[in-house]
Image: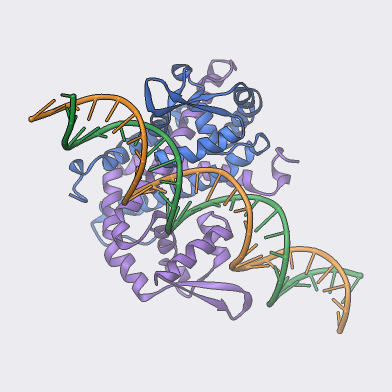
Chain colours: A purple, B blue, C orange, D green
Amino acid sequence: MAKQKASIAGSNGTTKIEMANRLFFRLYQCANMLHKTGSRAVEKEGLTTQQWAVLGALSRKSVQGGVSVGDLAKYLMVSRQNITGLLSRMARDGHIALATDARDRRARLVTITESGRYVWQVLALPKIHAYYEQVLADFSVNDTARMLHYLLSILENMERLDAPAASNGDDA
Amino acid sequence: MAKQKASIAGSNGTTKIEMANRLFFRLYQCANMLHKTGSRAVEKEGLTTQQWAVLGALSRKSVQGGVSVGDLAKYLMVSRQNITGLLSRMARDGHIALATDARDRRARLVTITESGRYVWQVLALPKIHAYYEQVLADFSVNDTARMLHYLLSILENMERLDAPAASNGDDA
DNA sequence: TAATCTAAGGCAATATATTGTCGTATATCG
DNA sequence: CGATATACGACAATATATTGCCTTAGATTA
């Protein structure tokens, strides 16, 4: 989120670095505002934006039998330690249930509860959709698709950076 | 970050809601990955992504005389209470200084210190620029500009949602 | 089959994000 | 000029994010 002029590196390089500065600064702000305004949208349901990501993930047909804590953390791209805390609060509130995996007693499987499903599908989703419509009011379908494409590209590059040291030169 | 099929709302509506789901989900993931990989890029300098946003903000020519805590919080779009904590850690580490504003004794002015400026300009910025180049490796200048445009548009809409109740119908 | 390696999840420490509330300071109004 | 309203920043509570490290469980190897 650097907001100062880059050192001189050619017109093109300077332009791109300056715009990169601004892009990441705005991405940082977007994240905070998503947390703030998105959590407000579902605060009456007792949810936060992070919990809605979890409930969304648990509602996928492919994980109806439950998903392990580790797989859920990978899917959401957060640390296992973080997801543990999130899930224990959601279990406390009755949205999800945790159970030991019979096939691997180290692992725990997460499933959405009946009341969690109700809160999610009946109470929260209409508000979430309304929120999306407000935030993307001036986006066409093409704009939405293109921004998604850019986010995916950035994510891929960040995942590449996140991989073990062999694949990047920073801490070799 | 809802990841399930929207209820039927016409082909166009469903497509847009589905893409909105994916867009916000990826935005959420991007934010976490920016925190994780971005902080790693500057961890040797003892910085985090949030602190780099602060140092970037303090390096602007327009605030060389210092900026108030409240104005900095507004600029970064975080709460005053959050920025207070961030700034006290950065003061502890010698990156910034805080002083009472002579014109308004409620307010405190934040300035970057000499050592903070050195850490920022000499040590951190080259790594930050390298980080940007890695994350935006496959982005043209036009792609970067367009992504920035989308982020600005989303931010404007979020700010509108964040404004006092009169301007949105949710909690009126 | 025992030793070694890897995996899964959570504890602990630390940083960062929000809202509600409070004390002090300044601005506005009658 | 005093009363009232608003501003500024921080404390407190809570939620969420990371990394390092530990215990237990499962997989692999000699």
Residue depicted at 61% across the width and 23% down the height: B121
Task: Using the image, determine if residue B52 lies above or below residue D1.
Answer: below
* Res. B142 in view: yes
Q: How many marks?
A: 0
Residue nearest the observer in this picture, A57 or C16: C16
Residue depicted at 29% across the width and 50% down the height: A131
Residue depicted at 37% across the width and 62% down the height: B4
Viewed as shown, does residue B8 lie left or right of B34? left
Residue depicted at 63% across the width and 29% down the height: B124
**Measured from the top left, where is residue A117 in percent x and y?**
35, 70
Viewed as shown, does residue A137 lie left or right of C13? left
**Measured from the top left, where is residue C20 in percent x and y?**
31, 51
* Res. B137 in view: no
Quarter assignment of residue C9: bottom right
Task: Using the image, determine if residue C12 lies above or below residue B171.
Answer: below
Viewed as shown, does residue D27 lie left or right of D15? right
Which quadrant, please, contains the C terminus of chain A? top right
**Measured from the top left, where is residue B92 in percent x and y?**
59, 35
**Measured from the top left, where is residue B73 in percent x and y?**
41, 34
